[in-house]
Image (cartoon, rainbow, N blue to C red):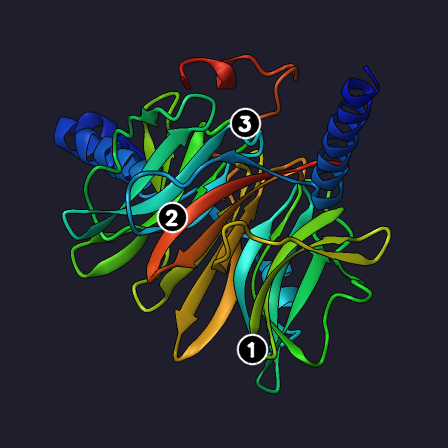
């Protein structure tokens, strides 16, 4: 009956079409992934600085006031161990991940130093990258291969971005 | 003659040392610092060929997209307004650029499709404020850090019904590679 009114009454039809169009513009089909969101929110006091790889979510998770880097396999819906990455004497600031989840770029604060590092997950190794000229790194972004990174660096009170290619 | 050979050996030795040093450091600068001051929030495309960043334009933090192969600034259709922008994120070939922008008194998440010229706004309730975001390499998922009631949390959104995947070069998808440069 309601449908009949829509098609018999032209103004009703146009209103209906307008509503459909508006809902499209407002992104009504971009759905929250509720099951995964429950998994993420249930694990820590707060989650921030998210980075997505092909099947990975990496973020800083807060446990009792201390941040640590966590990685979630979105297909298996499980946490991925990151041996040797989180240390009691350091605080992660920014993190990025390659598409295959094998390399992570990390900016962290340790004692009075802010360091830029590459973590190789399979090997469980951390490599410090020295900035030249010297500067204080803040945010980092890796490309999908994990071999090119862009770093936001403070030098002389100004923020700049440097692009670095890793060999090997 | 002996002097010449000895000098030649020294030159070869120095060149060898320099070569070894560059291997050990394993870091090579692709680009120098860009000329504009106050650049923040870098985000590389999956291919590593494009870089989105936030620069100050007339005091307004604005997203800018650069092609790293030639340093060219690429045009953005929907993101020349609604500043301040923050937290840009790119898909594999840079077809999709997601960014947090300002509409009225609300922070909103906008995804611009550079191929079709369309933009999509993520449906986030007003009381949830987007702070950071990350687009999956193929553009099919978006992770958003949200501030709500003084707490941070991350929410994942499935964009696959709205967005055609932006695949790596050489994949079967052809339309995602057109019109980007």
- Foreground tag (2 vs 1): 1
Q: Give the CA separation, mark 2 to mark 1.
A: 40 Å
Q: Quadrant of residue B72?
A: top left
- Dot 3 crowding, Cα within 10 Å, few <14, some 14–19, many 20+: many
Q: In which quadrant will I find the N terminus of chain A? A: top left
Question: Can residue A83 be seen in the rendering of this structure?
Answer: yes
Q: Nearer the viewer, residue B180 or B102?
A: B180
Identify the disc placed on residue A112: 1
Q: Label 2: which residue? A: B122
- Give the residue drawn at x 30%, y 38%: A25
From the top left corner, tell me how far across and down residue B172 is, in percent. 64, 14
The subunit carrying tag 3 is B
**Quadrant in the picture for residue B16:** top right
Query: On the rendered structure, is A108 left or right of B175?
Result: right
Q: Which residue is mark 3?
A: B166
Q: Left or right of A88: which side holds B61? A: left
């Amino acid at each position: 009956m309601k449908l009949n009114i829509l098609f018999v009454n032209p103004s009703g039809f146009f209103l209906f079409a307008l509503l459909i169009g508006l809902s499209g513009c407002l992104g009504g089909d971009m759905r929250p992934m509720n099951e995964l969101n429950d998994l993420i929110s249930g694990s820590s006091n707060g989650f921030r600085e998210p980075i997505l790889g092909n099947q990975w979510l990496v973020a800083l998770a807060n446990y009792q006031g201390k941040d640590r880097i966590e990685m979630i396999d979105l297909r298996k819906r499980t946490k991925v161990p990151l041996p040797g990455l989180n240390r009691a004497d350091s605080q992660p600031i920014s993190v990025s991940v390659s598409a295959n989840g094998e390399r992570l770029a990390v900016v962290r604060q340790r004692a009075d130093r802010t360091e830029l590092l590459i973590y190789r997950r399979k090997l469980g190794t951390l490599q410090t990258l020295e900035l030249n000229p010297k500067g204080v790194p803040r945010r980092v972004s890796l490309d999908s291969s994990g071999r090119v990174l862009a770093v936001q660096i403070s030098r002389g009170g100004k923020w700049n971005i440097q692009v670095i290619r890793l060999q090997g | 003659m002996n002097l010449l050979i000895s000098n030649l050996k020294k030159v070869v030795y120095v060149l060898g040392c320099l070569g070894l040093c560059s291997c050990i450091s394993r870091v090579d600068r692709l680009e120098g610092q860009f000329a504009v001051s106050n650049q923040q929030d870098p985000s590389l495309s999956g291919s590593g060929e494009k870089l989105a960043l936030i620069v100050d334009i007339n005091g307004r933090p604005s997203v800018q997209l650069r092609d790293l192969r030639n340093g060219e600034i690429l045009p953005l259709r929907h993101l020349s307004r609604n500043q301040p922008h923050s937290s840009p994120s790119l898909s594999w070939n840079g077809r999709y650029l997601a960014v947090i922008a300002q509409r009225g008194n609300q922070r909103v998440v906008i995804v611009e499709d550079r191929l079709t010229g369309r933009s999509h706004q993520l449906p986030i309730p007003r009381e949830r404020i987007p702070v950071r975001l990350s687009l999956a390499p193929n553009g099919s998922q978006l992770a958003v850090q949200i501030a709500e009631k003084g707490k941070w949390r991350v929410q994942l959104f499935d964009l696959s019904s709205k967005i055609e995947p932006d695949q790596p070069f050489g994949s079967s998808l052809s339309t995602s590679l057109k019109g980007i440069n």
